[in-house]
């Protein structure tokens, strides 16, 4: 028999996250003036706010923090950019940041590596990612950092993980970039999932903070310069691209004669040609104005003041600040429910939201702006807070910088290969067994999964006593037609955890949402719950571990990269958390318990097991996964229970001296030569 971290199903380590002090020297790499567009403005404002944030956080007498902006001398080959990449007229859209160094050129790989070497002394390097075309340069910066043996933390701020109009090879480039940094910051949950699917080890999500060009609004209410004829004057602002849906807006405009539209921006490629053709339709004569060309920031206030509403008819989107720009100038917004717009626009309060990709839906939205509705919506418009969102954004940036290095597979490559084979065999059996069982139950030839007998004999709170209890657990798993784990003691606590979920966390509907914290894809808890009928809804069963990379799905169960002390899940979103033989491997227990209490609903269940002995053997000098080997003592267990109670997790059962005693040490960890046992603790969220 061999149990413990080297062979057990829950053994993949859950390392403590690194909490470094705030960086003193930071570098932001990305486009800045004279580059035009929202990304250049964001990069400049990010450097400015980061410098201010670090200065505010510096203690008395501490050296002043240093922030540098590294930008491009040449961003794109002219043949691949359909417009002028520089701001026309040369006037900055926002005040510049100093110091700014323009050392990168798309045509000079030497400049990429040289830039990385020159900023190697920084504590934090932030790389701005917009299009895959620039990824080789960013990889060159990372190569320069490595060649200079830099200890800088690295974060990618991904405005678009993948472009709206992707090309072959884009995904491969993006995966190389995202998997090569400590963390990634994105602006929507959808982009976070895409980043994880493309190799990001740690992903943080924060709303895109305001970085509005053009200065303050003109005096007087928006739309005051428009002739009042009962109609509505609409503005579409920005470069015309296929994903922005301006063609759909023109189709919708044909159905709403009282609406007029100004299209202000560069008309690119096929999308631009389509818009010109649609605008020339006789049905739209006199109602569409094409103002072709980039709109300089200084002209924005007058342009916005001359219209009644801003329209954002996107087919798809990630994050945009155009809605915030409209609100800053007093305009309500008509937008589609995509990207960041649903979080920014309050339907019926300061704007109108419609489904994306539909001209009829846009036409209905336009009609909701007529007949005096604009007065009501304009009254609901509130100017955005231009400062507070940056605090949350910079906090997310620093969390991303902490990173989390994927753990090496314990036991070496051969054991990892064996575990991968066991994983595939396990889930193949579960998938077949589950489907056959469902078909037989549908024909009333067998009992449905919900009537499978509940595991018994393992206390909600107790200690594995002896080898007989190990044998009983294996035999019971086989009687219940649950695939027994080959490392026999692991079946004991898995049966206890599944029994606790069935009896304490679920109401019989098998809809409970369960997270296996510090999971492995060959752990028995989640496949057993699947056989009991859980996991019909996608995402209801999930396992997280720092060892995982991109999400993997096994028969409806998701395994993804995650930190048990910082799951990123919403408050009170889970019915149960299981954590089998994990907390002894360097996990900061108070933080884990606090995070578990946060994500559990009231009445939710935590089922936790760990290595234990009433008289722990000497582990001096023994390490595993980079941390000292730990076997909990009775005092350690009581302290864990006390810490759990402090965050609202109440023990199910009693923890007496008799409960904590055990006549044998039925668990043997061959890698260390240690003998001990397991303790199982079950808690309910008050």
Image: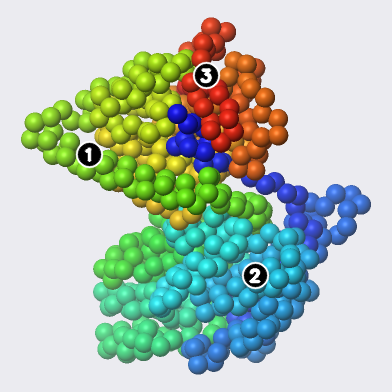
Q: Residue at x 72, y 79 (%)?
A: 114
Left or right: residue 439 compared with residue 654: left
Q: CA distance from mark 3 to mark 2?
A: 50 Å
Mark 2 or mark 1: whose residue is earlier in sequence: 2
- Image spot of residue 128 (x, y percent): 60, 69
Looking at the rendered image, the disc whose residue lies closer to the viewer, 3 or 2, is 3
Q: Residue furthest right?
A: 61
Q: Element at badge 1?
A: helix
Give the answer, above or below, for where 64 lies relative to 148: above
Q: How is the image coloured?
A: rainbow
Residue on which disc 1 sits: 434
- Image spot of residue 407 (x, y percent): 56, 49
| Dot 3 and dot 1 residues touching (CB under 8 Å) | no
Mark 3 or mark 1: whose residue is earlier in sequence: 1
Q: CA distance from mark 2 to mark 1?
A: 47 Å
Few, some or many residues within 10 Å of mark 1 (<14, 14–19, 20+): some
Left or right: residue 245 compared with residue 307: left
Q: CA distance from mark 3 to mark 1?
A: 35 Å
Mark 3 or mark 2: whose residue is earlier in sequence: 2
Does residue 499 appear anywhere in the picture?
no
Residue 142 - label = 2
Q: Element at badge 2?
A: helix
Q: Nearer the viewer, residue 283 or 614?
A: 614
Q: Nearer the viewer, residue 522 or 117?
A: 522
Left or right: residue 438 compared with residue 677: left
Residue 665 - label = 3
- Image spot of residue 403 (x, y percent): 62, 53
Residue 96 - label = none
């Amino acid at each position: 028999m061999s149990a413990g971290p080297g062979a057990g199903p829950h053994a993949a380590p859950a390392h403590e996250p690194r909490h470094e002090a705030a960086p003193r020297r930071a570098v932001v790499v990305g486009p800045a003036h004279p580059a035009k567009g929202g990304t250049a403005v964001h990069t400049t404002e990010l450097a400015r706010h980061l410098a201010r944030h670090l200065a505010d956080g510096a203690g008395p007498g501490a050296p002043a923090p240093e922030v540098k902006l590294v930008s491009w001398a040449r961003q794109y080959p002219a043949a691949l950019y359909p417009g002028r990449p520089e701001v026309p007229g040369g006037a900055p859209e926002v005040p510049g940041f100093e110091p700014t160094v323009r050392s990168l050129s798309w045509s000079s790989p030497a400049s990429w590596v040289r830039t990385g070497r020159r900023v190697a002394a920084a504590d934090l390097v932030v790389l701005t990612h917009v299009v895959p075309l620039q990824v080789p340069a960013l990889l060159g910066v990372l190569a320069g950092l490595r060649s200079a043996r830099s200890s800088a933390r690295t974060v990618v701020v991904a405005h678009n993980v993948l472009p709206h109009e992707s090309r072959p090879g884009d995904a491969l480039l993006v995966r190389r970039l995202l998997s090569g940094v400590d963390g990634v910051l994105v602006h929507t949950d959808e982009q976070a999932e895409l980043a994880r699917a493309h190799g990001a080890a740690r992903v943080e999500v924060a709303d895109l903070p305001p970085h509005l060009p053009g200065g303050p609004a003109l005096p007087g209410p928006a739309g005051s310069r428009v002739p009042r004829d009962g109609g509505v004057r609409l503005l579409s602002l920005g470069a015309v691209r296929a994903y922005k849906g301006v063609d759909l807006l023109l189709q919708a405009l044909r159905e709403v004669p009282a609406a007029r539209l100004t299209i202000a921006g560069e008309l690119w490629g096929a999308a631009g040609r389509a818009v010109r053709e649609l605008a020339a339709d006789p049905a739209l004569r006199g109602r569409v104005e094409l103002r072709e060309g980039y709109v300089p920031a200084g002209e924005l206030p007058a342009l916005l003041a001359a219209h009644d509403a801003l329209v954002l008819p996107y087919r798809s989107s990630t994050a945009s600040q155009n809605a915030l720009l409209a609100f800053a100038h007093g305009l309500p917004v008509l937008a589609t429910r995509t990207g960041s717009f649903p979080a920014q626009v309050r339907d019926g309060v300061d704007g109108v939201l419609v489904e994306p990709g539909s001209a009829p839906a846009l036409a209905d939205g336009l009609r909701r702006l007529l007949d005096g509705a604009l007065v009501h919506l304009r009254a609901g418009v509130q100017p955005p807070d231009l400062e507070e969102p940056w605090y949350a954004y910079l906090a997310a940036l620093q969390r991303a910088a902490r990173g989390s290095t994927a753990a090496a597979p314990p036991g070496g490559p051969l054991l990892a290969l064996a575990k991968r084979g066991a994983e595939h065999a396990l889930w193949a059996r579960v998938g077949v067994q589950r489907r056959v069982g469902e078909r037989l139950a549908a024909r009333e030839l067998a009992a449905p999964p919900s009537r499978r007998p509940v595991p018994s004999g393992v206390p909600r709170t107790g200690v594995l006593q002896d080898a007989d209890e190990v044998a009983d657990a294996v035999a019971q798993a086989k009687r219940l037609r649950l695939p027994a784990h080959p490392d026999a003691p692991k079946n004991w606590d898995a049966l206890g955890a599944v029994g606790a979920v069935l009896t304490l966390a679920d109401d019989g509907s098998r809809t409970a949402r369960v997270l296996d914290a510090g999971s492995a894809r060959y752990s028995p808890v989640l496949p057993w719950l699947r056989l009991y009928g859980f996991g019909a809804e996608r995402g209801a069963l999930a396992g997280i571990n720092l060892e995982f990379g991109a999400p993997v799905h096994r028969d409806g169960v998701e395994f993804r990269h995650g930190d048990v002390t910082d799951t990123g899940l919403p408050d009170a979103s889970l019915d149960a958390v299981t954590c089998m033989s994990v907390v002894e491997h360097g996990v900061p227990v108070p933080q884990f318990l606090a995070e578990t209490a946060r994500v559990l609903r009231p009445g939710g269940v935590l089922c936790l097991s760990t290595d234990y002995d009433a008289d722990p053997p000497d582990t001096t000098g023994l390490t595993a996964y980079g941390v000292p080997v730990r076997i909990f003592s009775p005092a350690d267990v009581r302290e864990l229970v006390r810490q759990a109670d402090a965050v609202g997790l109440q023990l199910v059962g009693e923890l007496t001296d008799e409960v904590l005693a055990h006549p044998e040490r039925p668990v043997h960890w061959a890698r260390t030569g240690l003998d001990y046992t397991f303790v199982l603790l079950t808690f309910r969220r008050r």
